């Protein structure tokens, strides 16, 4: 989800790479789950998030939608899935009674980032530290790659760039579709091809994603 604010308003003014040290370590949150509540529709899932969830939970996006764990919403004209917030305190649907994440090993990329964000520019991106999002005042430095805790980070970085800029192009196509017919077809194809069709969790995600993007490029 894009934020129309300047980095000076929300960050420490620095940009970080995967090998940089950043003051983001919250020490296991120690019982705090503030960042897992009141997030609205902002925890948007990308295809790799869906792959990870399917691998850990043994079910695809269709079942998670049916169970009310995930919902679909329009983001800049594109229909995308996000984690659903529930109950009076608007807590993540995967938060257990003790306030701990029930899918921590397969948590989405946005959750892995926190309190970091991504700043995209010139076909690439860097990380930035959000200064007003986490109430833990004693955070310590940790290597960005360790904090994100994702294997094959070079390939992951390439995937994130490809996905982000593909969505940018798709948003422009949707915005230029006055009657909405092409937008509807594009959204249906995107959901079916990149999200709803189950992945083979015994095989590499990145090869499967590349094959699906080849199909997507024909539309």
Image (cartoon, grey):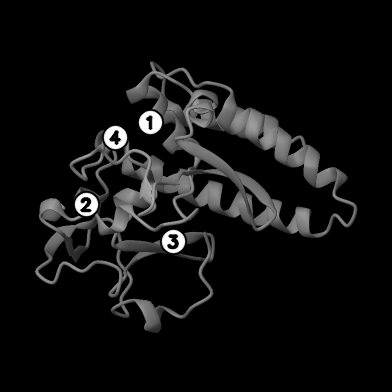
Dot 2: element: helix
User: Could you say where residue 68 lies in the image, as x and y percent from the top left?
Assistant: 48, 34
* Residue marked by disc 4: 103
Does the CB distance between marks 3 and 1 fall below 8 Å? no
Dot 4 falls on a residue whose secondary structure is: loop
Q: Disc 3 to disc 1, how far (Cα)?
A: 22 Å
Residue 126's quadrant in the figure? bottom left
Spatial distance from mark 2 to mark 3, Cα to Cα? 17 Å
Report the Cα–Cα distance between label 4 and label 1: 10 Å
Which is more N-terminal, label 2 or label 1?
A: 1
Q: Nearer the viewer, mark 4 or mark 3?
A: 4
Quadrant in the rendering for residue 102: top left
Q: Which residue is mark 1?
A: 52
Name the side, left or right, on which 53 lies relative to 144: right
Q: Would you call the spot at circle 4 few (<14 residues within 10 Å), some (14-19), or many (20 or more)?
A: some
Local SS, label 3: strand
User: Residue 80: x and y, percent?
Assistant: 59, 44
Circle on res. 191: none
Residue at (54% x, 40% y) in the render: 71
Which residue matches tag 3? 125
Tell me the mark number nearer the camera, choosing from 2 and 4: 4
Q: Earlier in the sequence, mark 2 or mark 3?
A: 3
Q: Earlier in the sequence, mark 4 or mark 1?
A: 1
Q: Which mark is residue 147?
A: 2
The structure residue drawn at horizontal position 30% and vertical position 57%, both measured from the top left corner, is 35
Q: Are marks 4 and 3 in contact (CB under 8 Å)?
A: no
Between discs 3 and 1, the one toward the N terminus = 1
Give the x, y percent position of residue 105.
Answer: 25, 34
Q: Earlier in the sequence, mark 2 or mark 4?
A: 4
Q: Is residue 132 above or below residue 77?
A: below
Which of the pair 63/5 is nearer the observer? 63
């Amino acid at each position: 989800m894009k934020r129309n604010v300047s980095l000076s308003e929300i960050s420490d003014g620095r940009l970080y790479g995967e090998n940089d040290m950043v003051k983001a370590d919250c020490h296991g949150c120690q019982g705090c789950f503030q960042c897992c509540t009141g997030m609205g529709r902002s925890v948007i899932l990308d295809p790799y998030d869906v792959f990870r969830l399917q691998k850990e939970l043994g079910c695809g996006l269709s079942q998670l939608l049916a169970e009310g764990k995930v919902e679909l919403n329009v983001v800049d004209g594109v229909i995308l899935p996000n984690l659903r917030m529930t109950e009076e305190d608007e807590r993540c649907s995967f938060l257990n009674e003790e306030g701990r994440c029930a899918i921590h090993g397969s948590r989405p990329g946005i959750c892995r980032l926190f309190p970091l964000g991504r700043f995209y520019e010139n076909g690439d991106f860097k990380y930035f530290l959000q200064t007003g999002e986490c109430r833990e005042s004693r955070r310590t430095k940790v290597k960005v790659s360790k904090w994100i805790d994702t294997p094959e980070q070079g390939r992951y970085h390439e995937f994130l760039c490809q996905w982000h800029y593909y969505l940018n192009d798709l948003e422009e196509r949707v915005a230029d579709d006055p009657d909405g017919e092409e937008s509807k077809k594009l959204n249906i194809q995107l959901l079916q091809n990149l999200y709803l069709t189950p992945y083979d969790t015994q095989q590499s995600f990145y090869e499967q994603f590349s094959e699906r993007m080849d199909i997507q490029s024909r539309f």
